[in-house]
Image (cartoon, rainbow, N blue to C red):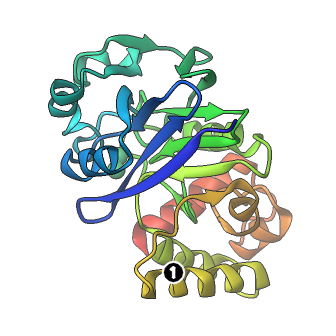
Amino acid sequence: MPLELVTIPCLQDNYTYLLHDPASRKTAVVDVPEVAPILKELLRREWLLSDILITHHHDDHIQGVDELRGVTGARVWGAEADRQRLPRLDWSLWAGDEVRVGRESGTVIDVPGHTRGHIAFHFPDSGLAFTGDSLMAGGCGRLFEGTPAEMWSSLTKLAALPPATVICSGHEYTASNLRFAATIERDSPALAARTARVAEARAAGRPTVPSTLAEELATNPMLRAALPSVKSAIGLPDADDATAFAEIRARKDRF
Ligand code: ZN
Ligand code: FE
């Protein structure tokens, strides 16, 4: 039985996710921007929280962790590389390590770029990936602590997951990400169609996450930097992939 996924809006524009294994009744949450909306959802579903997974150290992803642990007794999992600036970890993780939610296991993928110790979680059996502020809907996180080459390598790892993978990312930035995407690929029908879907969702107050990797591959300019048509569109037809990505990410910073 696949894991059940619940998307919870938090703060201004953050998202957190519940992952529930119906067989074992274990439930995990990925990042804790604030506690109240998570507790409300757990209560409503009569789910007990067993695990808290952390993608990276920024406040808007961890500030509720200690309080939520106090209320639920859940175990906290995060990157060993960032141990000093994360809440106290019960389990620390390196790339390739396994995390378990009930009977299903996920793999830790190292995705530095936004921050040095940023990790993602991939649950292959349920086809879910939790990418935090690395790969985002229509874009990627800003490079606060990493180089463009590091982020490009992180995105390349995520791009290699099965295209049907559901991408659970950390923020509602999709509309503006797609507005930027249209400055790179001006005549993309896939982008136009996604932009329309996103506008409709926002008008109805619905989240635009999760997305699928297939959608991201078709429309997210940060994943499309290696395409000859994209390199030409940014005036760098002969650039290597990481350089083309660096140019696109730099343009987004100025957008
Ligand atoms: Zn962040
Ligand atoms: Fe964030």
Give left or right: position of 148 versus 221.
left
Tell me if mark 1 has few (under 14), some (14-19) or many (20+) residues whose alpha carbon lies within 10 angstroms of its own. Answer: some
Q: Residue sitting at 23 percent across and 16 percent down?
A: 88
Task: Report the residue marked by disc 1.
Answer: 201
Label 1 CB sits under 8 Å from any ligand 2 atom: no
Residue found at the very far right of the displayed protein: 228
Helix, strand, or loop for circle 1?
A: helix
Q: Is residue 46 above or below residue 125?
A: below
Q: Is residue 168 visible?
A: yes
* Residue placed most toward the observer, 169 or 154: 169
Q: Quadrant of the N terminus?
A: top right
Give left or right: position of 83 versus 93.
left
Q: Where residue 65 sits in the image (x, y, percent)?
A: 23, 32
Q: Residue sitting at 61 percent across and 82 percent down?
A: 197
Q: Is residue 236 above or below residue 135?
A: below
Q: Quadrant of the C terminus?
A: bottom left
* Residue placed most toward the observer, 225 or 124: 124
Q: Where residue 234 sits in the image (x, y, percent)?
A: 68, 72
Give left or right: position of 41 versus 248.
left
Q: Is residue 135 visible?
A: no
Q: Is residue 90 above or below residue 249?
A: above
Counting labels gives: 1
Q: Residue sitting at 55 percent across and 79 percent down?
A: 198
Amino acid type at circle 1 is Ala
Q: Where residue 120 sits in the image (x, y, percent)?
A: 53, 34
* Residue placed most toward the observer, 133 or 154: 133
Q: Is residue 66 above or below residue 32?
A: above
